[in-house]
Image: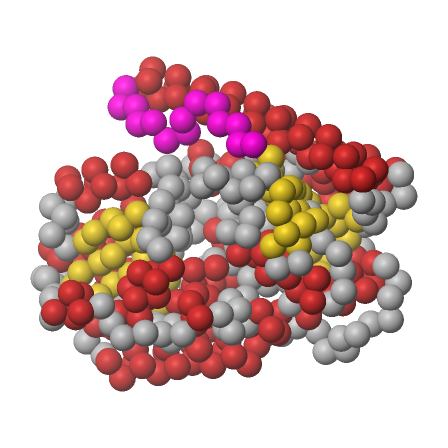
């Protein structure tokens, strides 16, 4: 497996690797060396992990206020990403050659982003190896979402070409939902039987998905606790959330709430500045990254969980792990009405017109005043995971895909959650 992220910290890749080991496959992961002093090579739960030293060229989140400064930062950021992707792709090739001669392997499994290491998979496919592409993100739509456009240009067309080459060079494609599956078929020209949906399902057997008593300090506030959990980049909509909280306070006259915004990302500095400008510092807190025990306690304390992803070319077709994690804690969710969010959450979420901050605030207020509805929505979400969308269910398709890829007798006859949720 090729992963430009940390292992075993990356949840989806960790769960897939462990599941394949459980079913008798030998798995090696090439991942990034984190800043925590991880070993360059180690065995993790039966998975052999090689870690590639991290290369970061230019800070991607340094703020700039002037137009020339923004252009300069954008240029440096672009150069940095291109250099880092080229380095990671080259390193994957070198490490893969080493592993082939030292240990041998039968398949390359690429987790994007980035897409560039597809050249490694394509090369080894020429040598008779299988190539599996795990389609986590849509690079063309991500680009449009980050630059605030609905239509393409030169960069967009280049990303579309890269994606098409990536999809077509793979023996098998794994998609995170049906929207991505259709993109693989329509844009990538894949046969439907070679595209499998493996959703991002929480592993409910893990201790982190077992609720604990609420945080005493939060409880002592006597307010409704709102929680956002996730990455904070330009496309993630946390700015919509902050402005919606202003509407909740100023337009709807509510002061009986406190919001925890948990996570990190390149937009955090700008979001903190926005919250300060709107006078919200007494109503919310940016926690940054928190240990698992604190995360579980905060989610257990939540009255309402928030998914502010706005409508955009990427968000309209993507599934958000945080929504499923909210459901694991039996929490009601407020979300903009996006196709894949509705597919995942169903009646566990209250949906409002996309990108309408006042409507979002009104939905929060409505749930704040209706504890019975909150409880019913949360119960529905937890049961939906237990019956259909937990990792125990959705991971079946991963094993079906691999068994078919290698011509093994199928050991699982009931597929995981598919188009008919």
Front-most of residues 106 and 43: 43
Q: Residue at x 57, y 77 (%)?
A: 388
Residue 169 to residue 56: above or below: below
Q: Residue at x 47, y 63 (%)?
A: 341
Front-most of residues 421 and 378: 378
Which part of the image, by quadrant, shows the C terminus? Answer: bottom right
Q: Position of residue 137 (x, y in %)?
A: 57, 47
Does residue 321 appear anywhere in the picture? yes
Residue 91 to residue 308: above or below: above
Task: Describe residue 143's horizontal placement relative to residue 333 as left or right.
Answer: right
Q: Does 65 lie within the magenta span? A: yes
Q: Residue at x 39, y 17 (%)?
A: 72
Task: Describe residue 95's horizontal placement relative to residue 313 as left or right.
Answer: right
Residue 220 to residue 115: above or below: below
Q: Position of residue 60 (x, y in %)?
A: 41, 29
Q: Does 325 lie within the magenta span? A: no
Q: Position of residue 111 (x, y in %)?
A: 64, 47
Query: Magenta span covers which residues?
Result: 53-66
Residue 396 lies in what quarter of the image? bottom right
């Amino acid at each position: 497996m090729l992963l430009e992220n940390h292992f075993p910290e990356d949840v989806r890749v960790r769960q897939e690797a462990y599941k394949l080991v459980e079913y008798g496959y030998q798995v090696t992961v090439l991942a990034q060396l984190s800043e925590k002093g991880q070993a360059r090579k180690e065995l993790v739960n039966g998975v052999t992990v090689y870690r590639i030293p991290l290369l970061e060229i230019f800070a991607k989140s340094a703020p700039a206020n002037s137009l020339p400064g923004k252009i300069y930062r954008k240029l440096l950021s672009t150069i940095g990403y291109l250099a880092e992707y080229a380095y990671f792709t080259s390193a994957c090739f070198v490490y893969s050659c080493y592993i082939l001669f030292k240990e041998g392997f039968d398949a390359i499994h690429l987790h994007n982003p980035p897409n560039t290491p597809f050249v490694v998979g394509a090369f080894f496919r020429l040598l008779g190896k299988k190539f599996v592409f795990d389609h986590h993100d849509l690079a063309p739509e991500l680009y449009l979402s980050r630059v605030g456009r609905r239509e393409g240009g030169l960069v967009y067309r280049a990303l579309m070409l890269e994606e098409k080459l990536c999809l077509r060079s793979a023996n098998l494609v794994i998609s995170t939902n049906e929207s991505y599956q259709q993109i693989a078929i329509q844009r990538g020209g894949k046969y439907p039987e070679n595209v499998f949906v493996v959703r991002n399902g929480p592993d409910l057997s893990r201790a982190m998905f077992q609720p604990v008593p609420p945080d005493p300090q939060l409880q002592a506030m006597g307010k409704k606790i709102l929680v956002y959990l996730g990455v904070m980049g330009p496309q993630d909509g946390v700015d919509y959330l902050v402005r919606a909280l202003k509407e909740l306070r100023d337009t709807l006259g509510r002061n009986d709430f406190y919001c925890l915004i948990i996570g990190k990302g390149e937009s955090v500095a700008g979001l903190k500045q926005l919250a300060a400008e709107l006078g919200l510092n007494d109503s919310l807190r940016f926690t940054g990254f928190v240990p698992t025990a604190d995360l579980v306690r905060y989610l257990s304390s939540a009255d309402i969980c928030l998914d502010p992803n706005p409508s955009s070319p990427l968000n309209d077709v993507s599934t958000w792990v945080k929504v499923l994690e909210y459901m694991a804690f039996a929490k009601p969710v407020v979300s903009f009405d996006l196709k894949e969010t509705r597919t995942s959450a169903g009646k566990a979420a209250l949906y409002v017109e996309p990108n309408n901050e006042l409507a979002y605030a009104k939905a929060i207020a409505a749930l704040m005043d209706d504890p019975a509805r909150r409880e019913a929505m949360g119960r529905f979400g937890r049961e939906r995971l237990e019956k259909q969308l937990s990792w125990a269910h959705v991971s079946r398709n991963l094993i079906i895909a691999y068994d078919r890829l290698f011509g093994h007798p199928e050991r699982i006859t009931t597929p995981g959650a598919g188009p008919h949720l």
